[in-house]
Amino acid sequence: MSLARTDGLGVKLSRWLALQTIVGLGAVCTAVYFAMALTLAQRQDDTLAQKQQAIRLLVGEGRPAAQLHEQLRDLLAGHNELSLLLVDTEGQLLFDKRAAPQPERRLKHLSFELARPGQAPVRAQAWLDISADQILLRRVAWTLALAAVAGAAGVSAGGYWLVRRGLAPLRQLTAQTQRLGGHDPERRLDGSGQPTELQPLVAQFNALLDRLAASHRQMEAFNADVAHELNTPLATLISSCELALRRSRDALEMREIMGSNLEELRRMAGIVADMLFLAHADRGSDARRQQLPSLAALAAEVLEFHEAALQEAELSAEVRGDAAAALDGRLLRRALSNLLGNATRYARPGTRVRIDIATAPDGMLELSVANEGPAIAAEHLPRLFDRFYRADPSRAQADRNHGLGLSIVAAIARMHGGSAFAESGAGRTRIGLRLPMTKP
């Protein structure tokens, strides 16, 4: 796999800053150049117009030719950049003051007629040498171009330094991230010296690490619980097989041993099946909704299935409330069966187990199973839906309950877009599901 090489953020920012600087300074220098060129052109036009007006006044006075010639020379004295040629209508030269032609000289030309009192008009041509202004403009252009390039280079260098300085916290953060490792899952990023803009990123990253550490701890605990739950029946099976093989046994005795082993194998198969179901739910599987016209009828079916266990535990049961909703009937029967089995194990003999179906004030559908018996301590309630978690540290009834029933209830609630809840107090425990109310 080949990876395309990309420039760093500092290089990109510096490049864009240099480009913007060049464009900005170029625009300013261009504006300055054209403003100066327009000013010089306007000054040249004004000079020609002033001289044209003065010449027009002198010629209009109707003075003799010699006197006019003398006055025009006085007018142009000290103005070597100006040339003037006066010719009458008959082609007679009246005044001529022109500089010797030079190839590099740039001239601005003005032609106009002059009226003389009682005489034919005079044709005048004036030239203004603008070579000095052109040289000045070229110098200004080069100066501005060099200033733009030098300014852009200086700003780019300063920008690159500032960008690198500004990105220093990111490099420190990267170094901290590289020091994070699996050997110390509790280590977090230190955001105390980071700028305000990076504080939310550090907080979100640390929160992600917290979730990963919690998942890691949960996975380790899950692996330990799985090993523990499977180790016991496996050890029992191995011991049973070893005892059966130590001596010859008749068919009846062997059938009893195989029946006992089959019971352990079924328990192991149940654990594996429940784990597969939870893994399937964790992958985001959704419930297959179907129209259930009466949840009370569905609950009555589950009650009938548990009738024998309820009688053995000296319990009675009832269903209260009813509702119609679009839910996965198969999953809902499994959840209610797990809740009812849990209530049967911990209910006080002679009491009544109750299945409640009701609509909460927020519109959510609540299905719960309540029983009377020892209350569950508040610190255990949030963890009742964890896999293999048992509030009883003695692990009583571990041979019949492997600790995945309530986890499956919570998974079924999530598959419906809802949640599981548990509350206990005053000798009564209620555990159930809160599901979005989807009416048929």
Image (cartoon, grey):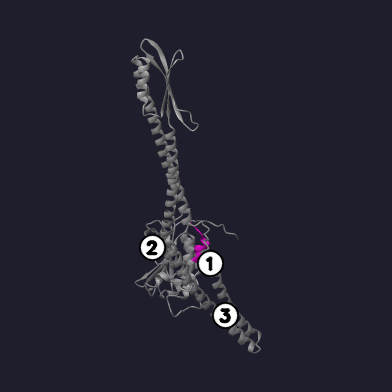
Identify the mark nearer the N-term, 3 or 1: 3
Numbered circles on residues, count: 3
Q: Is residue 251 left or right of residue 358?
A: right
Amino acid, disc 1: Ala
Amino acid, disc 3: Leu
Q: Is residue 203 above or below residue 393?
A: above
Circle 2 sits on which residue? 194
Residue 420 in sight from this viewpoint: no
Q: Is residue 263 magenta?
A: no
**Picture coordinates of residue 295, whole percent (x, y):** 47, 60
Main SS category, magenta section = helix
Residue in view at x 47 percent, y 75 percent: 312
Residue 5, image quadrant: bottom right
Circle 3 sits on which residue? 234
- Which is more toward the observer, 50 or 170? 50
Q: CA distance from mark 3 to mark 1?
A: 23 Å
Residue in view at x 48 percent, y 59 percent: 416
Local SS, label 3: helix
**Picture coordinates of residue 205, whole percent (x, y):** 43, 63
Local SS, label 2: loop
Q: Of circles 3 and 2, which is in front?
A: 2
Circle 1 sits on which residue? 279
- Which is more toward the observer, 344 or 16? 16
Q: Residues within 10 Å of mark 1 (few under 14, many from 20)?
A: few
Local SS, label 1: helix
Q: CA distance from mark 3 to mark 2?
A: 54 Å
Q: Quadrant of the N terminus?
A: bottom right
- The region drawn magenta spans 325-335
